[in-house]
Amino acid sequence: MQFSTLYRTHTSDKIGEDLVGKQIKIAGWVENIRDHGGVVFLDVRDQYGVVQVVLRDTSLLDGIGKEDCISVEGVMEHRGEDTYNPKIATGTVELSATKIVMLGKVKDRLPFEVPSSKETREDIRLMYRYLDLRNQKVKEGILFRSKVLSFLRNKMTEMGFVEVQTPILTSSSPEGARDYVVPSRKYKGRFYALPQAPQIYKQLLMVSGFDRYFQIAPCFRDEDARADRSPGEFYQLDFEMSFATQEDVFAVAEEVLGATFERFAPEGYSVTKAPYPVISYRQAMLEFGTDKPDLRNPLRIMDVTDFFQRCTFKPFLKKTVRAIKVSEEMSKGFHEKLLAFALSIGMGGLGYLEVAEDGSYKGPIDKFIPADRKEELRALASLKTGDTIFFIADSEKNANKYAGQIRNELGDKLGLTEKKAFRFCFVNDFPMYEIDEETGKLAFTHNPFSMPQGGLEALNGDPLEVLAYQYDIVCNGVELSSGAVRNHDIEIMKKAFALAGYEEDVL
């Protein structure tokens, strides 16, 4: 596309040694000014990078300050080899200015230096957001997001999905958080709700015969900020499929995520290849202590509850006991730091055993394990010389939680967790119901509109044994998304809600 040359003939990404000797124009903002006595250098920044401008006629500098917006005309020259700047793409050339036109003048003192804006207080950055966005790293984040969204759109379209923008002003559709509400001017005393997710509309699309839908959906939830999410508003790749099984959804997710991460992962990073591991909720809680397992960490948690119910260590009796085996050398100081960490997260202590060269055990709980049981423990945990095994005992819920945290701490502190990898998995087979801790009554665990595995027949048995067709996609211990096979059978829906205490008239 050809643009006007009134302000510029080239952007910084189009500037290189092939332009040496040619008259060109550039436009941008003055990032830095360096006066070398008789010669002045300007760093001029646009969206695409930085170009060094040399002013041999220093009168051209009159009235120019940092962050002024200017247009510069001149001749491209080679830099001297001893002045090359490998940190920028244009580091072997410079523009010898013959004319400068002021396009926008900074009137007041700058509240912060743009290149170091990320070190400034956040409230100041937000007040002067237009300056903060000039920071190259901040800008790169926005440009990166644009590239990812464009890639996702192209990928989803390529896979046969149709993009549909669903309404923003809508009626309330209960989700997991509070709605943001917008008062209606026309209907006094009534309110619109901002969508927590486009659930109702995408289901309408499926019922209407649209086979595959997607959108980069804005979601509004009146909840506190999370470590991985801004408060109030976020965007998600949202899609829905008709006549699809759980495995069909997995295949789409693998293709989209695999392609996206392969395309945008930093250089040197490894990405899980499809098919991704599928881990049941029960297995995840046992082996990882969480339903968001980080597969970069090779350590796994074992259940040794039954073993310790046949030993004499009273603190472990009538408790759930988890164990983590580590085949790494650990100093006394390491054990002390790990114990301090255990106490800091609420544990009462942290038992362990070390396997000596002669096969015997060393550790504070060795004497509580009967001699005839020690070989059983060795076989149970596949222990060998040099191994250390840690024990966590508490209620089942706490034992899982604490074991997961100890596993993460061991993986990080011992350098076992992969540094340059994105490790994906699906977690599925979530329980349909649980006992609410406050009411003591049966309640839905997650999405109440998901299909129970086994259908109506399964709901006639023990509700706590019913699993749902629900699943999460997890990467490096972070839940990227959740999904479910929707319950499309009204009779199964009635029974599922009745078990949770809902009358039919609420459906």
Image (cartoon, rainbow, N blue to C red):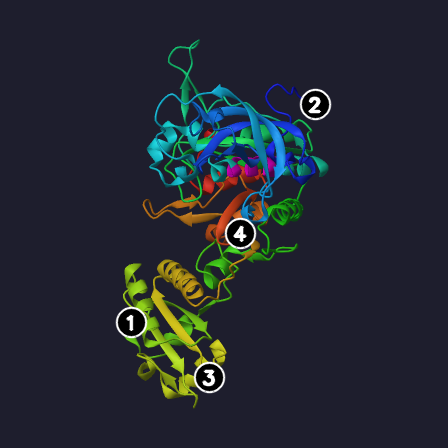
Q: Is residue 145 inside the magenta stretch?
A: yes
Disc 2 residue type?
Gln
Query: Which one is earlier in the sequence, the residue at label 1 or at label 4?
Result: 1
Q: Disc 3 to disc 1, how far (Cα)? A: 27 Å
Disc on res. 385: 3
Left or right, 203 with reference to 234: right
Q: Residue at x 41, y 65 (%)?
A: 413
Identity of the residue drawn at 31% across and 77% down: 313
Q: Secondary structure at mark 2?
A: loop
Secondary element under disc 4, as helix, strand or loop, is strand
Apparent side of residue 85 relative to residue 208 in the rendered image (left or right) = left
Mark 3: secondary structure = loop
Does 438 sit above or below residue 63?
A: below
Dot 2 crowding, Cα within 10 Å, few <14, some 14–19, many 20+: few
Q: Earlier in the sequence, mark 3 or mark 1?
A: 1
Name the residue that disc number 1 marks: 315
Task: Find the distance from the CA under tag 3 to the CA under tag 2.
Answer: 72 Å
Q: Which of the marked residues, 2 or 1, is nearer the chain's N terminus?
A: 2
Q: Which mark is residue 2?
A: 2
Q: 107 or 194: nearer the eye?
A: 107
Q: The N terminus is located in which quarter?
A: top right
The amino acid pointed to by label 3 is Thr
Q: What amino acid is found at the position of numbered circle 4 in the picture?
A: Cys
Question: Residue shown at 61%/46% (left/top)?
Answer: 257
Residue 500 image point, x, y percent: 44, 42
Kindly identify the amino acid type of the residue bearing the numbered disc 1: Pro
Q: Earlier in the sequence, mark 3 or mark 4?
A: 3
